[in-house]
Image (cartoon, coloured by chain):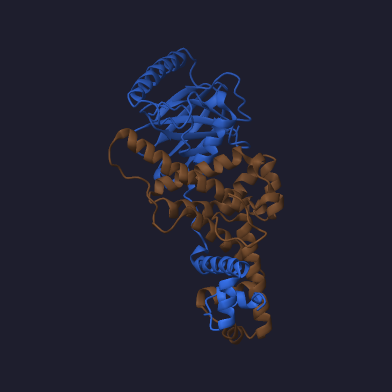
Amino acid sequence: MQHLDPDRLVTLALGESLTDADESDHLADCADCRTELDAMRHVADLGAETQEMRDLPKPPDRVWAAITAEIAHDKNPDIVRLTDRPNRSRPRWLSPLVAAVAAAILAVAGTVTVIRLTARPPAPAVTAQAALAPLTPAARTAHGDARVLSDDELQLDIRNLPLTTGYYEVWLIDPEDLTKMVSIGNLPDQPDVVLPIPQGTDLNQYRLVDVSVEAHDGNSAHSGKSLLRGTLTN
Amino acid sequence: MWSVTAMDGPDELAERFRSGDESALRAVYDRYGGAVFHLATRALANRADAEDVTQATFVAAWLGRGTFDPDRGGMLGWLLGIAKRKVVDRFRSAAREDRAAETVRALPEPAKPDETPERVLDRLIVADELAQLPPEQRRTLELAFYDDLTHPQISAVTGLPLGTVKSHIRRGMAALRRRWEVDGAAPGPRSAGHTRTW
């Protein structure tokens, strides 16, 4: 007997039973037809299973945010990455130490800011500002403003951030290339704060103000979890 | 603005992606993020693990965009191949951490024992190809797959001549099979002459 007809192979693959003795005999002898039928059956089985594959749910928004943030450090390691990520292999006792060092640095930075503020004449010029709007449902009641003072400080007034066991960090991001960002500093536990903008930061480029929630994991890179964002305008 | 980029043909999108256009990454994510996430959620019981795998897949795809070769298969197959490897990595690292800690913890076990990442991947590929078939061809195949109708029954339901139904199903099956052979994962049966080494 010659090989099975392609149409016949399809109907067999789709579940029709073998009734013809010649067909059965041929299949028993012919490896090619058997292989062919097996492949068609597999495809038919897969086809029958595809019914549940329509309108697959999209991943949650935080996955995309994490992707852009992670791509950011790979592209611009000097700006945002001090340690490699993920850091699962790091001994756990290191994390509190790193956090403590970070806190000490912050304390110094905070002192510097306060000294600079007190030395400053009243009502510094606001050169740009942004209203900050929530980016995730978790922060839906959060809101705030950012003002650039004399092009070298960022004054933030932020309310109703969700509780966290970590801390909040402020970034300036290039909205045309979300992989480019500059960390401005961490938010202390008070609504109104002024953070110095690193010298040489082009605010026409880095004009997207971003507040992220970060874990005390010794990882200086953006967590990908942005809570608030707003674009600076003059 | 994504709606504009999402209208690109697959080739144009792949080209923009390979050239490092970040808006193409977003378009690729919009188009295939659901499939990658589905593979991860089906393969891993823990949803957080599935999100991590989805993230790792697109990051790896972006960083390795130069290695995507459209001549060797489609972008969905390429992405799902990366996702499958990330799932396997996740199994291995969990097993390693577990041994190191010498504790019994919740490993990311497969959601279903018989639901291998390869099977899910193959299904996603076949579903994607099915969705791209001409409407009438797709409809006849759906009636055969989902409703178990025979060719004459499909002919009666659709009003198409029996010969047309046969040729739709034969061509549709051939298209699904070709795509599965190019982009599928499982080292399952391949027709003679198309056998690949794994």
Give the image quarter of residue A212: top left
Q: Which quarter of the rendering shows the C terminus of chain A? A: top right
Q: Position of residue A67 (x, y in %)?
A: 53, 40
Horizontal side of residue B20 vs A18, given as left or right: right
Q: Position of residue A210 (x, y in %)?
A: 50, 34
Q: Is residue B142 visible?
A: no
Q: Position of residue B20 (x, y in %)?
A: 67, 39
Which residue in the rendered view is the most extreme toward the left? B103
Q: Position of residue A23 (x, y in %)?
A: 59, 79
Q: Is residue A118 above or below residue A35?
A: above
Q: Which quarter of the rendering shows the N terminus of chain A? A: bottom right
Q: Name the residue: 40% across, 45% down.
A: A138
Q: Name the residue: 52% across, 21% down.
A: A124
- Tell how many labels: 0
Colour chain A is painted in: blue
Horizontal side of residue B177 vs A223, given as left or right: right
Chain letter, brown in picture? B
